[in-house]
Image (cartoon, rainbow, N blue to C red):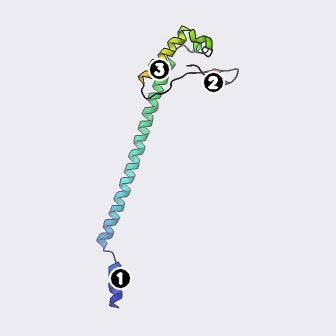
């Protein structure tokens, strides 16, 4: 009987150790919860800032040239056009100002073919 009692007393974990383990688990859960919340918030702010930056670049590029003249720039003959050259140089300047932008282009919509095509 004494052997059984000794074995049982060795398997019993003191209440202090149980409380310590429970506090560690609760602390880790709180830390992971806060970390996840902070990560999500930072990601949202970064994405919002990034998209606003891209929108600003697009607005600057959109106001660079006349839209009615842009409709005719989809042909090879428009390469010698001074307005086309000015718009192209302006696009290059805008692209050089933003070091995180790789491509800057404009598109036209062909109503007859119901397609978009790249211009600059």
Q: How far apart are marks 1 and 2 (CA)?
A: 79 Å
Q: In this view, does 76 lie to the left or right of 14?
A: right
Q: In this view, does 106 lie to the left or right of 7?
A: right
> In the rendered image, which residue does mark 1 sit on?
8
Q: Which residue is drawn at 31% across and 72% down?
A: 15
Q: Circle 1 — which element?
A: helix
Q: Do the residues labelled 1 and 2 touch (CB within 8 Å)?
A: no
Q: In this view, does 11 lie to the left or right of 74?
A: left
Q: How far apart are marks 2 and 3 (CA)?
A: 21 Å
Q: Is residue 51 above or below residue 63?
A: below
Q: Which residue is drawn at 32% across and 68% down?
A: 19
> Reading the chain from its start, which is encountered first: label 1 or label 3?
1
Q: Where is residue 20 in the image (x, y as percent from the top left)?
A: 31, 66
> Reading the chain from its start, which is encountered first: label 2 or label 3?
3
Determine which quarter of the picture holds residue 30.
bottom left
- Give 113 or 85, whichever is nearer the viewer: 85
Q: Circle 2 — which element?
A: strand
Q: In this view, does 6 lie above or below 78?
A: below
Q: Position of residue 24 (x, y in %)?
A: 33, 62
Q: Where is residue 25 in the image (x, y as percent from the top left)?
A: 36, 61
Which residue is situated farthest in the bottom direction here? Answer: 1
* Quadrant placement of the N terminus: bottom left
* Quadrant placement of the C terminus: top right
> Reading the chain from its start, which is encountered first: label 1 or label 2?
1
Q: Where is residue 32 in the image (x, y as percent from the top left)?
A: 38, 53
> In the rendered image, which residue does mark 2 sit on?
116
Which residue is situated farthest in the left direction here? Answer: 16
> In the rendered image, which residue does mark 3 sit on?
60
């Amino acid at each position: 009987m004494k052997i059984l009692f000794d074995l049982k007393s060795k398997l019993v974990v003191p209440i202090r150790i149980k409380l310590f383990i429970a506090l560690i688990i609760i602390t880790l859960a709180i830390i992971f919860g806060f970390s996840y919340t902070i990560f999500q918030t930072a990601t949202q702010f970064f994405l919002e800032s990034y998209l606003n930056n891209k929108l600003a670049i697009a607005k600057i590029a959109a106001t660079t040239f006349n839209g009615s003249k842009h409709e005719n720039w989809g042909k090879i003959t428009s390469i010698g056009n001074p307005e086309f050259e000015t718009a192209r140089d302006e696009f290059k300047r805008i692209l050089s100002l933003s070091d995180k932008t790789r491509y800057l282009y404009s598109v036209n919509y062909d109503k007859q073919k119901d397609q978009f095509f790249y211009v600059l």
